[in-house]
Image (tube, coloured by chain):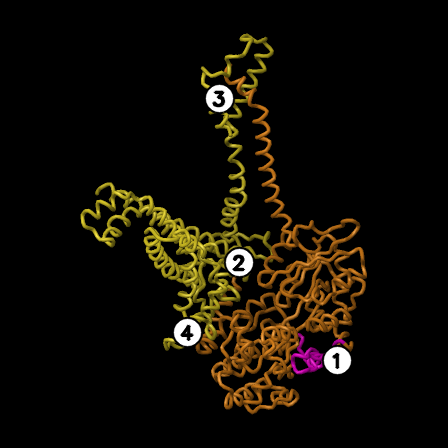
Chain colours: A yellow, B orange
Amino acid sequence: MASESRTAAPSPTGEGAAPRPEDTPPKSDARRRERRSRRYRLDVKWSPYAYIAPFFLFFAAFGLFPLLYTGWASLHRVELTAPTDMEWAGLHNYSRLLSDEFFWNALKNTFTIGIISTVPQLLMALGIAHLLNYRLRGSMFYRVAALTPYATSVAAATLVFALLFGRDYGMINWGLGLIGIDNIDWQTGDWTSQIAVSSIVIWRWTGYNALIYLAAMQSISHDLYESAALDGASRWRQFIHVTLPQLRPTILFTCVVSTIGAVQLFGEPLLFSGSGATGGANHQYQTLGLYLYEQGWVNLHLGRASAIAWAMFLILLLIGAVNWLIARRLRKSEGDS
Amino acid sequence: MRITVPNRRASSPRRRSRRLVAVAAVAALGAGLLAGCAEDSDDGGRAGSGSKDGKTTIKVGVFGVFGLKEAGLYDEYMKKNPDIVIEQTSIERNENYYPRLLTRLGAGSGLADIQAVEVNNIAEIVETQSDKLVDLSKTPGVDKNKYLDWKWQQGTTKDGKTVGLGTDIGPQGICYRKDLFKKAGLPTDRDKVSELWAGDWNKYLEAGKKYKKNAPKNTAFVDSAGGVMAAVTGSYEDRYYDKSGEIIYKSNPRVKEAWDLGVDFAEEGLTAKLQQFQKTWDQAYANGTFATVSCPAWMLGYIKGKAGEKGEDQWDVAQAPMPSNWGGSFITVPKAGKNTEEAAKLAAWLTAPEQQAKLFDKQGSFPSASAAYDLPQVADAKHPYFSDAPIGKIFAKAAEGAPVQILGPKDLIIAQNLGDVGMLQVDQKGTSSEEAWKAATKAIDNALDK
């Protein structure tokens, strides 16, 4: 709004001053004007800050403060039964994570589930985007359809998938039974349960990524394809040599977003198990998010849960740094070529 | 300067009003958000408890289908006390309800006037939160002698403050399918069935082996090994803690016995390899794939709901091998509530024997007030869905024989990990008993370590 008033200020030749009858106002009036103009300058200078302040206030209250407080709590022994009773523990909560096999198990699960959900998800999204990029009858319908899973709530989707993957009466086992494969106990096996959880993630996010790819694809200049076609490149060659390189920044972006999502994976494994936060009898699909929840809200150890939260945060920072390095390398190699 | 001043003057009314709008919007947003944090009203926007139009609102916070409302007790109380309005908020699962209750007790705000507590959490509440709860023992209408002594003790601190009044308990019977028993050549009459395993959980295992010999296709004797283990642990005085409050489950022969029996059931192939309260368990009821389950009184309604019409008159209830208890609840009155006095009165009324008998009649929650057992609603109670089994008598017998269990603050965590980590591995994955025990104890050690 401040900028609006600034742009509204007319140029020196504008009509603003011209029609004023008294060119030399009395002294008191001048002083008042002086004061007003000072206020105006203050207004212009400070009101932008006032306008963006709400965001920063809320960010401080609901983003920054919890982050810092979690960090502070992670250095203490705190139980949910007495959250104000904090006993200094130094780095104990972190050092015990190093020897905590449940933490490493959760980290490993997060990693493997992350891989088996993210890789197929992005590849499929790329393929779907490529198909949607052709001129299709009812393309709007397909685009909306691709986005519907994303709009479904995690809880609803997970409950349905848990039923589909049921051991005795699940539809997937029924389908496998038709082609002669015995019932699989999806939830009990290490890999099978992780695949089941990943499939929920894939189902929910593929369409979303496909639309992002599609948007990027549509901004690729047609000239590139035309000249490629003139050079005799097939559709596939065009995809490899024109589409993919042009999509590189977008692909990097979706990789980062999916990775962050994968590290924070929580709702799907929690609801898939149906009870408790152990992530299966063998903790076979307990992710970091789920382990954090178990420590904080089932075992009531807030300090330990906070340390896990910060460990997750550090892991994300690490991933961010790696991503930045790759991006820089990519940009360099682009500059070279 | 000369330029800007008139311009400013010209636009100032509009600007000011616009700025006002912006400030108002921000203020409204902020207020809304803050109010959202502070009040957290689950009841559709009505203001918090307190007096309004001369009426006092009492809020009750419960988990699951607690039954008080469903049995019409609130309506009855409100009719008797026209100045009282009772509002209930319920959170589906206790595992979500309990942490929230702790947070709010810690913060001293956001609490309902009456808060329910599950038996697995009562020891922790009594031990760590008693200074935040009202001592209900002196509330008019509360009479210690009308309750089962052990239930009363569970809600009472070491220095004699009773912060939790017992609502229901969970005396167990064995629910069984008559049609499956008949096909397998076992007796179907409930007295004969009770006799089959009277006095010894091992006889229950023997009956299972007999069942398996002629078992109808695709059925198992029992739902889960974990269920058997839980039932057996429920029939002894000590399980995870000893009297001095030490954790002894690793060396307690009772726990070992329960564990071994669960393992036997799994290894003999007598279980349907299910996990209780999962969708698959519900489906198994509907499809009738197991013949028995140890069922506390409160589970009868659940079974009826899941087994549905198809199971009508197929189910019956027999006495468990040994009297055993699983579950039950308490209600407490937090000091931070707004109407502690009225709330205490209501709590006393809700837990009085007459009301508990009504609760049993309507909802099947078995009274913890022993004075209720002679009331006709309990003594003559029969359950039509379970072949008119005299459930009042069956469960009263179990309740009176059930041991005075020693509870500890971390009972739930120990029980959960023994069942959902340890026994479930044996049952579903075929892990060896030693390895599964190791996995369970490791998880428990990790959970208990601060």
Q: Which amino acid type is marked by label 3? A: Ala
Query: Which residue in the protein does label 2 denote?
Result: A296
From mark 1 to mark 3, how far is it between C-alphas?
89 Å
For residue A171, side relative to residue A296 (left or right): left
Q: Could you tell me if residue B158 is visible in this image?
A: no
Residue A38 in which image quadrant: top right
> Is residue B387 covered in magenta?
yes
Image quarter of residue B337: bottom right
- Would you say A103 lies left or right of B248 here? left
Camera-side mark, 1 or 3: 3
Side (left or right) of A257 relative to A15:
left
Q: Secondary structure at mark 1?
A: loop
Chain at tag 3: A
Report if the CB atoms under discs 2 and 1 are less than 8 Å apart: no
Same-chain check, marks 4 and 3: yes
Q: Is A142 in front, or is B277?
A: A142
Q: CA distance from mark 4 to mark 2?
A: 33 Å
Give the residue type at disc 1. Answer: Asp
Find the distance from the CA under tag 2 to the CA under tag 1: 46 Å
Tag on residue A9? 3
- Rendered position, B156 above or below A52: below
Residue found farthest to the bottom: B185
Q: Looking at the image, is mark 4 or mark 2 earlier in the sequence?
A: 4
The residue to which callout 4 is attached is: A184
Are the residues under badges 2 and 1 in a single subunit?
A: no
Name of the residue lying farthest toward the front: A137
Label 1 Cα crowd, 10 Å radius (few <14 / some 14-19 / many 20+): few
Mark-to-mark CA distance, 4 and 3? 74 Å
Res B380 label: 1
Where disc 3 sits, the SS reads loop
What's drawn in magenta, residue-wise?
A: B377-404
Do the residues indicated by labels 2 and 3 lie within the same chain of the protein? Answer: yes
